[in-house]
Image (tube, rainbow, N blue to C red):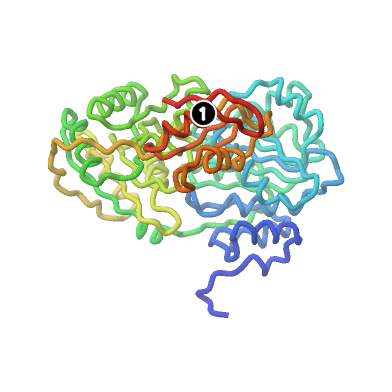
Amino acid sequence: MDPTTPPTFATLGLAPALSEALAVQGFSSMTPVQAQALPPLLAGRDVIAQARTGSGKTVAFGLALLARVDVDVARAQALVLCPTRELADQVGEALRRLARFVPNLRVVTLCGGVPVRSQVLSLQTPPHVVVGTPGRVLDHLARDTLSFDALRVLVLDEADRMLDMGFHEAIASVVERVPPRRQTMLFSATWPDAIRALSRTLQKDPVDVTVDDTAAAAADLDEVFYSVEPADKPATLAALLLHHRPASALVFCQTKNDVKDVTADLARRGFAALALHGDLEQRERDEVIVRFAHKSCAVLVATDVAARGLDVKDLSAVVSYELPHDVDTHTHRTGRTGRAGKKGLAWALVAPRERGRATNLADVSGRVLRFEPLPPLTDERPSPAPMTTLVVDGGKRDKLRPGDLLGALTGDVGLPGDAVGRIDIGLRRTWVAVRREHADAALRGLREGRIKAKTFRVETLG
């Protein structure tokens, strides 16, 4: 075999049900983190793994934990802790896709922002796999609505972010309620001392997996720094967005007040911009994220904390409106673009008082930062967002599926297939992305027609 050829999942001897799920999703060759982590994980070893976001780590720990679940034992056997609801939802869906051919296997997601009562009802039939945030999982343990007496596998995903968000005590409290004889998997994008200390507390003789993809990340990233006076930052940001016209851009600010100010300034300049910060209610937060993922909003302005766990595919550009104080945060920001072999853009607006942070970044990373002249100012107007998001007052409880919405729009309404984009189905609501030029027809058609022989209320989001 050519040593440069990536190893395939076929070499692992997985159960047929897991192999079939991989094949259906088009997975054949393993990513570096999967190739290094899966053999020891499948052998039952504890693993501490470092790899950047988007490296395939969810499939790595997902296959390993599903391989250890016995569906004939109606008890919670695997727990995945995540820092945010958004990441937990993504992990839960990924595990369900991997387990789609495993009969009767139950995966439950437990996060804040969802009524506890509905979760209590879902736990009356014990799940095999639990995915959740530390606080809500601990809440159910305290209520005795959840038990980990039969737990075999514990996974901490994005462990560095969980510690950054102050979850150390909650994690420790959860661990007190799980059996000491278990397999523990710890995945993190960065390895500060706190992660090493956590590993020593939770793991036994772990296999150390480090994926050095710095060169690959750099090759996929066009990163530029701009020296700019603080008062000129709003105009500079607008000029960058107009000059490059990225399909989507995530702008990071240090405080929620900055987020509000920057979003308001962009809106005044005609950009389809939304804000993501800690003052939003969960429903507002969900709708902002949906609109950004649907491309019905072109620019999302957020704090680092508010954007934890946010995973938007094909993110074109990341902007540091202000440089963060630490290198790990900068790494998290830029790691959100330039994935899966696609080129990403990263821009940093550096005021005079931030030059020391830039110098520290260069020293720690061992590279020369590329500073360029500011882009020219222009009177051009930004293009409108290409999509519009429609919200349907019905969801999983109404047994709606993506195919039902797609069929109604392309069949009954008569839209072309490429006019319909991403469809997200929640418990009570469904969000549908439709090309802007077809939005009025789609809204009118869904209001006047039926979906699965039922009439639903339909509105435009935003």
Residue 429, image x, y percentages: 58, 28
Indicate whether 344 appears above or below 107. below
Which residue is drawn at the image coordinates 64% and 41% (left, top)? 92
Instruction: Report the residue at 75% width, 36% height from top.
Output: 178
- Camera-nearest residue between 206 and 314: 314
| Residue 371, image x, y percentages | 19, 49
On the question of residue 194 being in view, the answer is no
Q: In the rendered image, which quarter contains the C terminus?
A: top left
Can residue 256 be seen?
Answer: yes
Q: Which residue is mark 1?
A: 391
Is residue 1 depicted above or below 438 in this figure? below
Furthest residue to the right? 72
Q: Of residues 310 and 409, which is closer to you in this image? A: 409
- Residue 301 in percent (x, y) is at 35, 31
Q: Is residue 338 above or below residue 6?
A: above
Q: Amino acid at mark 1?
A: Val
Q: Quadrant of residue 142?
A: top right
Instruction: Quadrant for the N terminus, please.
Output: bottom right
Q: Position of residue 309 (x, y in %)?
A: 50, 37
Q: Is residue 115 above or below residue 382?
A: above
On the picture, is 326 further left or further right than 37?
A: left
- Say left or right for 195 vs 302: right
Name the secondary structure under disc 1: strand
